[in-house]
Structure formats: C-alpha cells, structure tokens
Amino acid sequence: MQILENISLQAYNTFGIDQKAKYFVVIKTLEEAQKLVKEPIFLNHKRLILGGGSNILLTEDFDGLVIKNEILGIQKTKETTDHTYLQVGAGVSWHEFVLETIQLGLGGAENMSLIPGTVGAAPMQNIGAYGAELKDIFHELEAVEIATGSVHHFDKDTCEFGYRESIFKHQVKDQYLITGVTFKLSKKPQFNTSYGAISDTLQMMQVAELSLKAISDAVIHIRQSKLPDPKKIGNAGSFFKNPSIPASQFEQLKSTHPNIPGYIQEDGTVKVPAAWLIEQTGWKGKTMGAVGVHVNQPLVLVNYGGGKGREILALSREIQSSVKEQFGVTLNPEVNIY
Ligand code: FAD
Ligand code: NAP
C-alpha cells in the first residue's frame, strides 16, 4: 500500500471534475483494508472511500485520504437446486459482474446491465434500473468497521434497503468500508421485460428467443441511446432521486397538470419522474458556463469540459428552486456531494 500525495481526482470521477486529494491510496485485499484503518494517516484525516466515482460530485479539493477500492475476484460460495451464490470483491466493476452472471446462465442482474461503478458501492443506494434493484439479488455483504478494523457481515434486513437508500447512507454512514458482496442468483431465471422500452427494443432487435443475454443487450442498447457516455460528457447519471409524494398532493397536481406521470408505491405515495418535473420548468438542455442539463435526459447534469463541482451544485440548486416553486415538490440529490 503506497500513500500518494496531492493527486488529481479528475480521472477518478465520471463528472471529470479536477479537484485534488491530499492523500490517495489503493487497497486490493481485505487484509489491506483492515491494516489501513489502523494507520495514523487514516485515523488523523477525513476519508473518502472511492469506487468508480460515478455517483459523487467533488465541490472542492479533498483535504484528507481517498481510499480507492480495488478488491477483485468472483467466487461461487454455495449452490442449491434453485440458486447459486457468488461472492464478489467490492472493487469488481458492476457491469463485469452482470456479464459474468449472464455467462453463467444466472438470472436477476440482467436488467441492471451497464450501470457504471463498482460492486462495493452498489449497496450504498440499492442501485436499480428497469424494474430491478440490487436488493432483489442481494444475500449479504462483508465490511470492515472503520473504528475497530473488525470484519462484519450485513444480511438483507440489516441493510434496510429502500428506494435508492440503505443503512450506509444513514445510521452507519461513513462507519464501514465494504469489501465484498454475496449475491443469490437464480438458476431458473424469470425474465422481466415489462419495464420501459425493453420489450419494444427486443422486438426491434428481432430477438426470436428470450434469454438473459437478449435482455442485457436490449438494456445496453437503450442506455447507450439515451444516456450520455461519461467518457465523452462528464456526468454521474441521475442527479436527483425521483420524489415520492403523498397521493393527495399527486391528485392536486393532476388537476393542474393532467399529463403528470406517477407510479403508486407500496406505501401509498406516488413516485413522480424527476425528469418530467425538471423538463416542465424549462431547464432541459440549458447550460450555465461549462455545465448544464442534458439535452435528452434532464435528470442528468453534465460537465461539458472544465466545469467546476460548485458550478454543478449551484445549477442543481436552481433546478430544485424551480421545481419547488412550480410544483411544491422537493428534489433531493442522489449524487453524493463532497
Ligand atoms: P462511487 O461514486 O465511487 O461512490 C459512491 C458512494 O459510495 C460514495 O459516497 C462512496 O464513498 C461510497 N462507497 C463507494 N465504495 C464504497 C465501499 N466499498 N465501501 C463503503 N462506501 C463506498 N445508479 C443506479 O442506481 N441506477 C442506474 O441505472 C444508474 N445509471 C447510471 C448511469 C450513468 C451514466 C452514471 C454515470 C451513473 C449511474 N448510476 C446509476 C449511479 C452510479 O452508477 C451508482 O450509484 C454506482 O453504484 C456508483 O458506484 P461507484 O463505484 O462509482 O461509487
Ligand atoms: P424511463 O424508462 O424513461 O422512466 C422514467 C421514470 O419513470 C423512471 O425514473 C422510472 O423510475 C419511472 N418508471 C418508468 N416505468 C415505471 C414502472 N413501470 N414502474 C415504476 N416506475 C417507472 O427512465 P430512464 O431515465 O430511461 O431510465 C431507465 C431506468 O434506468 C430507470 O429505472 C432509471 O432509474 C435507471 N437509470 C438510473 C440512473 C441513475 O443514475 N440512478 C441513470 C440512468 C438510468 P425508476 O427510476 O424508479 O425506475
């Protein structure tokens, strides 16, 4: 483990923001993680655990230690008649893991193809897409407790997964370094093509027989056609979470905005696509200097090159104000702001 100093983080965040880390270290094993949390440089500085940097916004230099998680490896740990359990290193790329499940004929992750980032960050916000969420295939995770260096295991209930939420964003925020995740995948996959454009895309791709690979290819196709590629335009995916509002408020908004889309949630609230709200306020495609709101997907804020994190933050606040003023709805960031 080599501690580097004064390192640019531009290549380590998908917004491409050029801020520096005072100290920077890469960890490649559980043992290195356990050792690191006892080192003075770790104990005496604020810390940022980094995966792929696809869900962070850096608004200033990081005056502390950035720990880049590169713990790799995918291992089968258990098999039953219906399921296979895979233990995956926290530093494995999420999409590589999804491709591995497809290769092995295991179902459950295919609708989450091409989500950027690492496996270790995925439980943080219970990542999801196209009607699937991490929690649907999650078995347990392994994490090093920062205060003690001891290894803890969290099962699904303990993680308190919610819509883009988990215990790691709340009660135990900044207290654990996730080192691995075990997934429970189905040997008898049930295909879910009902969400969004999946079935139309499968038809367009002239898929004769449904398979994990066909669904994954369709999801990849949709994502590549709708979302900006962070390698070309800096972004961190959806900047805000989709708000869930009381059904009564939704009905009221429907009387003034008959086209407002909404999806009833288990708790009776209604999830309203933040992209629709932002588009109504006129922000879609607007720019403020080098940063802006994507032309096709208004939920995605972008850095066209040379933009600052604080400019993106300022833009996000303007958008929040407009949506609040026009709809009385509060948008909360999904991206982690530093
Ligand atoms: P980072 O950005 O590196 O970190 C995110 C947070 O997790 C930080 O607070 C960090 O400190 C913490 N963290 C990271 N690793 C660990 C660890 N090992 N232990 C403890 N804490 C850790 N998200 C979705 O849910 N669905 C989508 O469909 C989706 N699409 C996206 C599309 C694009 C183009 C982009 C750029 C992003 C998208 N995202 C999506 C957001 C992002 O990909 C996910 O949130 C992803 O899980 C972030 O992984 P990461 O490794 O890049 O995390
Ligand atoms: P979309 O299909 O155009 O749908 C717009 C919004 O409506 C989505 O936010 C989605 O909520 C909601 N929605 C659509 N159909 C739904 C259904 N049948 N049931 C419940 N909610 C429904 O969305 P998109 O922007 O192209 O994204 C497609 C998928 O990829 C979505 O699941 C989205 O979350 C995911 N995605 C996430 C990010 C990110 O950074 N978090 C970035 C890009 C794409 P949900 O978001 O809750 O699904």
Image (cartoon, rainbow, N blue to C red):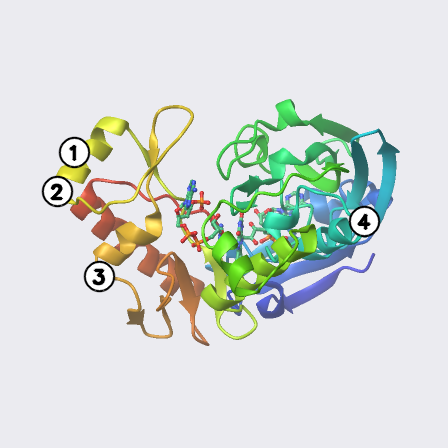
What secondary structure is found at the residue carrying circle 1? helix
Q: Quadrant of residue 147?
A: top right
Placement of 98 over or under 264, stated as above or below: below
Structural distance between the alpha carbons of marks 4 and 1: 49 Å
Placement of 207 over or under 86, stated as above or below: below
Circle 1 residue: 252
Labelled pair 3, 4 in contact (Cβ < 8 Å): no
Q: Residue at x 31, y 39 (%)?
A: 262
Q: Amino acid at mark 2?
A: Thr
User: Closer to the camera, 140 or 303?
Assistant: 140
Q: Residue at x 59, y 35 (%)?
A: 168
Badge 3 crowding class, 10 Å Cα cut-off, few under 14, some 14 to 19, many 20 or more, is few
Circle 4 residue: 104
Give the left or right position of residue 39, taking residue 5 as reference.
Answer: right
In the rendered image, residue 71, in percent from the top left (x then y), is placed at 79, 51
User: Closer to the camera, 115 or 172?
Assistant: 115
Q: Is mark 3 within 8 Å of ligand 2?
A: no
Circle 2 residue: 256
* Sequence-first tag of 1 and 3: 1
User: In this orientation, does residue 337 appear?
Assistant: no
Q: Nearer the viewer, mark 2 or mark 3?
A: 2
In the rendered image, residue 247, in percent from the top left (x then y), is placed at 27, 28
* Sequence-first tag of 4 and 1: 4
Structural distance between the alpha carbons of marks 2 and 3: 17 Å
Structural distance between the alpha carbons of marks 3 and 4: 46 Å
Q: Amino acid at mark 4?
A: Leu
Circle 3 residue: 282
Q: Quadrant of residue 308?
A: bottom left
Labelled pair 2, 1 in contact (Cβ < 8 Å): yes
